[in-house]
Image (tube, grey):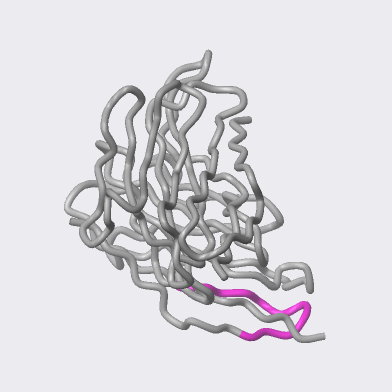
Amino acid sequence: AQSVTQLGSHVSVSEGALVLLRCNYSSSVPPYLFWYVQYPNQGLQLLLKYTSAATLVKGINGFEAEFKKSETSFHLTKPSAHMSDAAEYFCAVKGNAGNMLTFGGGTRLMVKP
Amino acid sequence: GAVVSQHPSWVICKSGTSVKIECRSLDFQATTMFWYRQFPKQSLMLMATSNEGSKATYEQGVEKDKFLINHASLTLSTLTVTSAHPEDSSFYICSATGVSSLGGYNEQFFGPGTRLTVL
């Protein structure tokens, strides 16, 4: 069984500040991990994914995430927030067999000017 | 890259009518498609998984007679909400995975979603 916990349903940062969105997972098998972004009334856009290669994964729009097996975490970071980063972010996990994704509850990122 | 489209992007219907939502993979063969439902300010809830040519597998609590899923080809899956009621109003998102000319995918590609409003 797999599960994902996103700590903090809402995160607010100032423009230019560090963005940190937390994701912890549980999986009985080595996981694939994903971060998606969703803008209002739109589908999900893949930001980045971890597929057992490098533990530090760089994605689009300046985001990156580090897979830490010892902490079962896959936190998303961005050094400097931009107003356009305001959106809903979802962390998801997939086992190495099968295609089913398990999503976290989502974190709404707000960026203050 | 792999692209998934949905049609319509939004639909308003009267209570009691049926609504069909299409999900298409535009540049790859979608051997597996997923249908999700998302209520406002909530995460995605998987409704069902469908493999091309097979009956869909529904998640617990999802009525298969109400949410009819057809995946008759490698590029098209449809979700029909039968006898829709206001409580069925939601954002429906499909995703797909499968194979391209370069091999199999290990991720899902998401459609843009369909906003259903039942009056």
Residue extending farthest right? A113
Residue A1's place in the image compared with B96, above or below, is below
Q: Quadrant of the C terminus of chain B?
A: bottom right
Is residue B72 in the magenta section?
no
Q: Position of residue B8 (x, y in %)?
A: 64, 46
Q: Position of residue A5 (x, y in %)?
A: 35, 72
Rendered residue at 64%/66% (across/down): A78
Q: Quadrant of the N terminus of chain B?
A: top right
Front residue (pair B89, B49): B89
Residue extending farthest top? B101
Residue B44 shown left or right of residue B58 in the figure:
right
Q: Position of residue B82 (x, y in %)?
A: 41, 52
Is residue A15 in the magenta section?
yes
Rendered residue at 43%/54% (across/down): B36
Front residue (pair B46, B77): B77
Q: Position of residue B98 (x, y in %)?
A: 43, 26
User: Does residue A58 appear anywhere in the picture?
Assistant: no
Rendered residue at 56%/32% (across/down): B24
Q: Which residues are magenta?
A: A12-22
Residue B81's place in the image compared with B103, above or below, is below
